[in-house]
Amino acid sequence: MRDQLRAELLKLRSVRTTWLFLAVTAAVVALAVIAQAMTASGGDLPPVSDPETQLMLFQSASGLAPVIAVLLGTLGLATEVRHHTLASTFLANPRRERVLAAKAVATFALGAVLGLVAAATAVIGSWLVLLVTSTGLVADTDRILAAVAGTTFAAALAALLGLGIGGIVRNQAAAIGAALIVMLAVEPLLGAFVPDMAAWLPSAVASRIAGASPDADPGLVASASLYGGYALVAMAGAVAVVRRVDV
């Protein structure tokens, strides 16, 4: 198991896709900070000197990091199926459950790194906005730190969820497409037509964890447990598929 985990971590460090996703994540979050700062300066939001506006800037990664992490996670198995490298992995280690367990741990760690990069970009970008506007920090620092931790954890679980989706769908393009359709179309429609479900849908739960909202309903612990449950169900499905299907 330990050797397999090292191999999986080495794969993630070696492929350009990992570094590309991290760079895109930082760029997207930076643009989000800039966009929110410009909105505040234009009068559509309270000014940057307002505590809630500052907190919004520091939380710019909360809704973005889990979405990007899901997409990154889908590539963990789907890409290997596409390039026919999963078969050689299973030849080297015939116990498929161990291989998937190692992939799950490695993907969880990668998701945490992506979440931390996103949160750090939001924090640095927000500090720069405060410096440029000569504004002091008035936002609650405890909530900022909680958002950094929440974004990191939510992205880690999101990557694990994506890994499960990729293992079930197996086709790289279809896995990414399915994840995007669910997050950007199916969930908003369900939330609109069945409002009572909105707070329990995966994207809403992930954003609540990442935003570390103390007044969230369900609460942070319940949200983390629920999102972890989504990820575990997806991984269970991936294990069932990989055990039965030739690679």
Image (tube, rainbow, N blue to C red):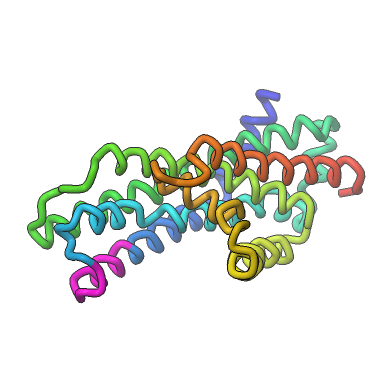
Q: Position of residue 124 (x, y in %)?
A: 26, 51
* Magenta segment: 33-45
Q: Residue at x 76, y 49 (%)?
A: 167
Residue 43 colored in magenta in the image: yes
Q: Residue at x 46, y 58 (%)?
A: 64
Q: Position of residue 188 (x, y in %)?
A: 59, 67
Q: Quadrant of residue 61?
A: bottom left
Q: Is residue 219 left or right of residue 91?
A: left
Q: Is residue 202 visible?
A: yes
Q: Position of residue 239 (x, y in %)?
A: 80, 40
Q: Is residue 73 above or below residue 132?
A: above
Judging depth in this view, the residue of 61 and 45 nearest the camera is: 45
Q: Main secondary structure of the magenta part?
A: helix
Image quarter (top left, top right, bottom left or bottom right) of the N terminus:
top right
Q: Residue at x 59, y 62 (%)?
A: 195
Q: Residue at x 72, y 52 (%)?
A: 165
